[in-house]
Amino acid sequence: MSEAHCHSPAGTQARTGAETVVLVGNPNVGKSVVFNALTGTYVDVSNFPGTTVELTRGRLGDHDVIDTPGVYGVSSFNDEETVARDIILSGDVVINVVDAVHLERDLFLTLQLVDMGKRMIVALNMADEARKRGVAIDRDLLEDLLGVPVIETVAVEGKGFDELIASVSRARCGHADPELDVDIVEMASRVGTRAEALMVLEGDEYVSERHGVPAGDMRDDVYLRRRHRVNDVCGHVITETVQGASLSAKLSHAMMHPLTGIPMLFLLLYAMWVVIGQWVAGDVVGFLEGTIMNGYYEPFVRQVVGRVFAPGSPLFVILAGEFGVLTMTPTYLLAVILPLVTAFYLLLSALEDTGYLPRIAALTDRSLMSMGLNGRAIIPLILGLGCVTMGTLTTRILGSKRERFIATALMAIAVPCSAQIAVIAALMAKTGAIYAGAYLVILFAIFVALGTALHRIMPGQSTDLLIDLPSLRLPRLDNVVRKSGVKVWGFMKEVTIFFLAGAAFISVLEILGVLTWIIRVAAPVTIGWLGLPPQAAAAFVMGFVRRDFGAAGFFTMNLSSAQLLVAMVTITLFVPCIASTMVVLKERGWPFTIGLFASSIGLAFLLGGIIARVVGVA
Amino acid sequence: MPEASAPLLNPEAPLLCELCSLDCIRKGERIEIVSVDDQHARVQALRFGMAEGACVKCVTKIPAGPLVLKSGRQEIAVGRALAKRISVRRLS
């Protein structure tokens, strides 16, 4: 029956040259591992135009293969779905990877693809894990019910791939929803393909607009029928042997319950800080930056540039000065940001693989709600502790503009990044435990107060938490390494240009004598209001270039414990670094960035001054 | 699968079914989802297999926080505010 639709006027789009195979699946089903196995190595990783959604392309024989972002369905609820939708619409053959353990969830997308009339194959992944959990799936029956080839794979062990590759030529259209037939054929005659017709009927505004037809209103009906079909298929193909509460169910509960979950979360944060803040930011960066870049690379560059431009001349300063684009910029990017971001993404990818993150989201949902966020926001906030730039980019996963606004503001103002935490920890270690404790309490209070205030002031509504809790499993090293590799590359590509521009800008300020001018002009504030030495102003400006520079500037000032507390709180609240400012500017626009600067400078000095008076240094 | 294909309660025996919002369900209770008063959440719930009419179990209720619902091996966490807008019927 559906064969007919397959070959309807534009059932598959005519393309010059190779056919395109598109990999589609829910998040975390092992899609990328399948992609790698099919194509060998990454051929091209790029951002989908206008988004930051990564697209990976490769080749399999004569076919182009495109990996799509993991989605639960095809429509336009977020960037990932929009990208996946457009790739699927333009593809010729779909390989749909489904997680055998979560067939009830995954088949919903499968049946949507079937209804779209795409030629497809289903890769039934993790069939071994499903069997271990007492879930047996009748592959032959599933193939009959769906009407498309179903191949069992164990992606991480490479099982079933030969068969999968061989079956690409057997891809065919499945048994679509018969009740949709009349409407879809009628719509397809107006918009071209059955797939696009389905999108229109399901009310996808973008696709409708593209074809100049009104968006349909059948989504609820179509989805509900599809859900019943999925349940029906599952009822037939799955045989389940019931098991008692397993260890992972207990662990899952413990991760989400405040009594056990909060200590676990703190343990995790502490472990991350030891690895990133101490080990990577301290030892690895210390060696790369201090020994290699400052010891060998920068003197060499200065010598070479000095032969062409006289040292001290404006061009020399811009190229090889203190903030030079050939000196500080590569040092910062390669010796500081690269190791930190790599470590962070490695840890984060491992965490993503375990399925712990959505449980942290459930744990923290209640607390974040009072700040106008839902549990999902914990992911960018934790990332922000590593690098505010990274955290800001990740606010894209939040459900509304309002939440992205609040999360970005909180991170830029009240969350110190890992590089800064390392220096602050070293400085605060010199003070008594009371001061170190006071620093933490003050910052936490500011974080909560700021979030609550923004929640009260901001108009609009935030979205509620509705999050998939994937099974808990151990991360796989190869998967973690590959995934973080892609992310690190994407991140470095994105920040490098911003940082070059920022460094050049600061050099210009230096050439114009603005830095010394600031130290002089700011003296009443630094000395009079904050009770700090005048050079503190330079540290604040440096804090703009690099947040840890800012904090490190206080090392040589011989401050008392009380002065250190004032300085550390002020520098933490003070403006975000240049790289994150640029990303904030790109993500949130000018008005937000100007407001952010005004409020972070205002808050930093206001609270710094108040603390200075409380502890009696001013 | 057994949970989703379990027969719906007999509509002629309404005294057995207690309608209430999801947030008053206790841990361990089995429920049938009656309606979801949120367009986006309804679509997501359908995708996760927890549509109107689905029978699910509340496996965890975080104090003042989200509820965790389970259908088959699929688990989702539902924020408390959203839970108030989902009406359900107790099955046990």
Image (spheres, coloured by chain):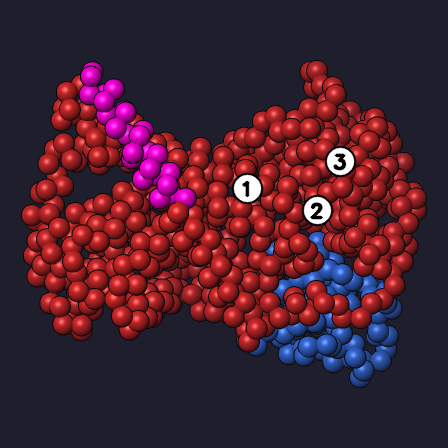
Chain colours: A red, B blue
Marks 1 and 2 share the same chain:
yes
Could you tell me which residue is drawn at 62 percent across and 65 percent down? B78
For the residues labelled 2 and 3, say whether their Cβ atoms are less than 8 Å apart. Answer: no
Q: Which residue lies furthest to the bottom in this view?
A: B15
Q: Where is residue A543 in the image (x, y as percent from the top left)?
A: 25, 48
Q: Where is residue A433 in the image (x, y as percent from the top left)?
A: 30, 71
Q: Quadrant of the rendered structure where residue A120 is?
A: top right
Q: What residue type is labelled 3?
A: Ile
Magenta region: which residues? A284-308
Could you tell me which residue is drawn at 45 percent across and 57 percent down? A274
Q: Which amino acid does label 2 sit on?
A: Val
**SS for dot 3:** strand
Say which chain tag 3 marks: A
Determine if the magenta segment contains residue A294.
yes
Identify the residue under disc 2: A29
Relative to A55, does residue A343 appear above or below in the rendering? below
Q: Quadrant of the rendered structure where residue A76 is?
A: top right
Q: Which of A420 and A283 is in front in this view?
A: A283
Q: Where is residue A490 in the image (x, y as percent from the top left)?
A: 49, 36
- Residue A95 shows which numbered tag? 3
Instruction: Point out the tag, 2 or 3, that comes first from the N-terminus.
Output: 2
CA distance separating discs 1 and 2? 17 Å
Neighbourhood count class around disc 2 (C-alpha, 10 Å): few under 14, some 14–19, many 20 upward:
many
Say which chain tag 1 marks: A
- Residue A484 shows which numbered tag? 1
Marks 2 and 3 share the same chain:
yes
Determine if the magenta segment contains residue B60.
no
Instruction: Point out the tag, 1 or 2, that comes first from the N-terminus.
Output: 2
Relative to A443, does residue A123 appear above or below in the rendering? above
Q: Which of A278 and A68 is in front in this view?
A: A278
Q: Tell me the mark number nearer the camera, choosing from 1 and 2.
A: 1
